[in-house]
Image (cartoon, rainbow, N blue to C red):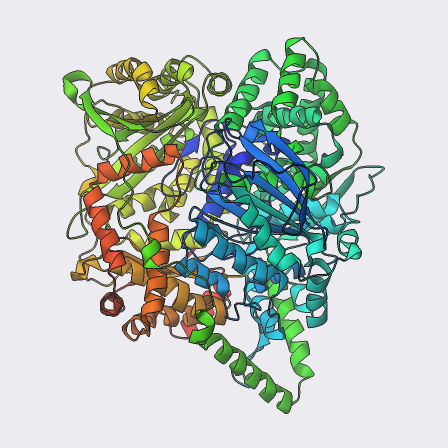
Amino acid sequence: MGGRGWERRVVPMCLAYVSSWASATGGRVAARARGSALRTGALPRREARLQSRRADAARGGVVRPAVTSRRWTAMNAAQSAVAAPETLGAPADVEVGAKLHGFELTRAERVSEVGCEARMWRHEKTGTELLSVCTPDENKVFSVVLRTPPSDSTGVPHILEHSVLCGSRKYPVKEPFVELIKASLNTFLNAMTYPDKTCYPVASCNTRDFYNLVDVYLDAVFFPLLTPDTLAQEGHHIELEKKDDPLTFKGVVYNEMKGAFSDPERVLASLSQQVLFPDITYGVESGGDPRVIPDLGWEQFKTFHEKFYHPSNARLFFYGDDDEVKRLEKANEYLSLFEPREDAAKSSMIDLQKPFSEPRVASFPYDAGKDGLERKYMATLNWMLLEGSKTDAEKLVALAVLDHILTNNSGAPLHKALIDSGLGEEVIGGGLETDLRQMMYSIGLKGMDKDGAQKMEEVVFDVLRKHAKEGFSKETIEASINTIEFQLRENNTGRFPRGLSLMLRSMTSWLHDADPLRPLRYEQPLTAVKNRLAAGEKVFEPLIEELFISNSHRARVELTPDAEAAEREEKREKERLLAVREKLTDKDLENLIAETQRLKAKQAAHDAPEDLAKIPTLTKADLEPKVATVPYELEKVGSGSIATLMHHPQITNGVVYVDLMLDATRVSPAQLPYLSLLGSFMTELGTTKQDFVELQQRIGRETGGVRVGVSLSQMVAADGNGPALGRMLMRGKSMVAQVPALLDVMRELLMEVNLDDKERFKQLLTEERAGTESSVVPSGHVYASSRIRAQYRVADWASEKMSGYEYLTFLRELSARIDTEWESISAELKAARNAVVQQNALVLNVTTSAGDFSAVKPNLVSFIDSLPEFAEAPSELWTDHLVAEPGSAKQSEALIIPAQINYVGKGGNLADIGFKATGGSYLASKHLGTSYLWDTVRVQGGAYGGFCRLDMRSGAFSFLSYRDPNIDYTLKAFDGAAKFLRDVKMDDKELEKSIIGAIGDMDSYQLPDAKGFASASRILSGETDELRQQRREEILGASKKDFVELGDALEAVKESSAVVIVGSAEAITKAEGEGVELKNKISLF
């Protein structure tokens, strides 16, 4: 959802870390997120970019991507925590067979790998299974999971997933989901549609808040107020404003999926699955095909809910430190209202795909723009593998290790061979996928010529045959085993609840009526695989032969560039609507106009106060008045005490997190994009001592991962225009005993990275350019935001040069001259590296326990001493760049992309007109996003998301829309925000709810490493605990005055604000005809 919707082939931010085995983040492992350029050394570039893209899509609070996981390895079924202390929340005297609150306990086991007591309860009346995981984790998780296999591509499970959260029996308001966003302390609130299931998870650290969320979600799932209007709003409807206007399709999911279908890689991933599973539910589009979504009628929609949304087809999951008895009591409150239905579970069973007798090939056209089509072919090679829930756990572990060996970094044999072949520009495909009942494997290339697909398949089979015969080196295997085992024991889920990842892993078996605990137990199968390897057994070679070489159930799926594809699709949609119109009489048209107006009026109407009051909320009295602080210690070290060693003592179970922060303000403007490349490529270039394959194996064997990037921001200042702040970040982690090896790797990367290997750099540059180009269409709002903000502050200007449209332009230009100007390019890279690698102003932040810090401190000091003391600065620094004068009119422009949707951005800087942002301002901006923008841009306008952001440090204010069918309408909605705030009607209760939600944002859940890094970042930027406490008190004491003042400021900058549209040529031309003024139009493809 919120996107509470669907994105295929991508891991939801909440689960992404478990799919790969390098350092953890909220996305697919660490990443080159646009603007910060963090890159892991053990992660394929395609995976880093995919996670970054989806993380971007979720920013803004109300764009809630619920996505289909397609890179969910077998080892995800084993990710777990270090053994935890005494289990909380579980009644100690309950034995198997006990009955409590309508449930019977059928199983109780200690799962040491996740440090918990797991109990399976069966509801006596309905047969519903409830997995209760009792653990000391305060971040409590609940989820309802239903099998929801679609039979066509109308997107009915996806639309229903949106719709059930649009009002229910106990909570008859338009959007209970949004009310919870406004007024809860949730650490996760979403809904997610997969090819075969729908999940409704919530999480909170506050017990009362947690059960409020649970109650709203249970009522939504089992007692939604579904109406044809719900289907029209969330799914699709035909809209007509005036009699002479053309008919148009509108609907949140409809536009969401038009956006999804504008992303070629996502389309290819979806088609790969469909071609591989043509006879079962995996052969259709669970998210919905925009060409088919309008076929969904009310009866089919209603029947789908009646058929699948019944307790007998549901699985309930609880996790955390809350009282287990209360879990059962709350669940029984709902389940007891239903009669059992044996057919509910039987009708939702996922069928098995019958194996192919011979391989298949399928080809499909796609919109690739107008230029360079000869090198825009892409293809994947896909295999159907085993039925995961019935496959031996040891074999699953071995298969996951094999997947990691083959593709999980740029030095991996299969990945490297594909790139070295020169057939394409970037490796694509998700590798091993275990989330489907029958696992699949996918690998491929993009940026090929028309004959590339067959050659790509030959390269893949050459690699597979080679290693089926010869096996892999000891170093390669050790690197993968160590990386996997480290991540299993670390269990670092980034920003997202550990319980949610555990639930999704259990579903790989539980959904198919197998043991939900088996995927959580990794010790025995991992040890068995290690022992077999130690004994010299060939573990991986037979798997390659069985599952790949001798497996006839495979398909090569190709996308061929077609310059007319978009025009054909637009024509098809217009002809469909014209055919509808031709059948309508004048009276029918009048009725359609009236119906359009009626639906809009209903969408714009306010909920009754008495209905809003039914949504359970906390009160201000439940909030902690003091900001949470993180203790730390500082000391000056290095030659002349010019460096800083910072320690954040945290319980990390023996893991040491090392954050090296180098001063990145001492480079020239021209060097900025080179510095970005350096951050992206440093772990993938090799060093003067090792080539990149050996280096990545070493990182995998000896550490828990290393990632490098650049972060830009600005210092806190009263006028919102503090000094620019730039840091090159090298973040690593290891167990205590591995710290010397970790620091040696980091030193070698900094001092001896190989910047002379033209061919390797050219490979990486090609991948970076291709990946950046691919990110524009699905993340257009990020590019729009970057272009807007770059016009106001120097740090944002620099960020645009390092990650925005200007960076893409730089990559294209650099690609064109690398063969003729390599020596100068290499010199620029070395100059950028030399400018930042120094002890001066260096900060080394370490997060670990006090005892472990004392043990490794001598190593840390020696590491700092090994670096140069000072670096020579260039004559011109990027921090001296002058942006446009405050208050001056800013650039309005359009970036034209091949897409069926748009991203609309508008923004200005409030500090430049003297506005002082406060905690109350932040509260008002959050309320603006979850009320006015949600209603006007998303609900009424049909965009997938509409949101705003107030940067408390710089004063920048941005409006953005996501997957938007409109341009002019959305800009007018943005301009109406000031009036909304000035005229806001908010009683004390509504204000209190907004305060609760804002405090919830401020108190977002963090694991120990994140606490240490965030604290260090705040210290460097001058954001003191005193300032944080002041902001908190301003939020707690906010009033309507704060809303009015923000509205006044937005009105004052409205005319001078920058506008950036990222969208289709047709939509931009239409917007200009409607009066939108754009001074500059740039075609990106």
Query: Who is closer to the viewer here, 91 or 629?
Result: 91
Farthest residue, direction bottom: 587
Is residue 671 placed above or below 941 in the rendered structure? above
At a point 54% along the width and 68% down the height, the residue shown is 170
**Where in the figure is residue 691, as x and y percent of width and height?**
47, 17
At a point 15% along the width and 53% down the height, the residue shown is 719
Is residue 761 placed above or below 919 in the rendered structure? above
In which image quadrant can residue 836 be found?
top left
Query: Who is closer to the viewer here, 6 or 227?
Result: 227
Farthest residue, direction front: 93
**Where in the figure is residue 344, as x and y percent of width and height?**
76, 56
How many tags in the picture? 0
**Where in the figure is residue 1016, as x and y percent of width and height?**
27, 34
Q: Is residue 264 visible?
A: no
Is residue 37 placed above or below 126 in the rendered structure? above
Farthest residue, direction top: 535
Query: Who is closer to the viewer here, 773 or 259?
Result: 259
**Where in the figure is residue 395, as x and y percent of width and height?**
70, 25
Q: Relative to residue 423, is residue 742 drawn left or right?
A: left
Q: Relative to residue 1017, is residue 317 drawn left or right?
A: right
Q: Relative to residue 727, is residue 754 drawn left or right?
A: right
Q: Is residue 401 visible?
A: yes
In which image quadrant can residue 354 be found?
top right
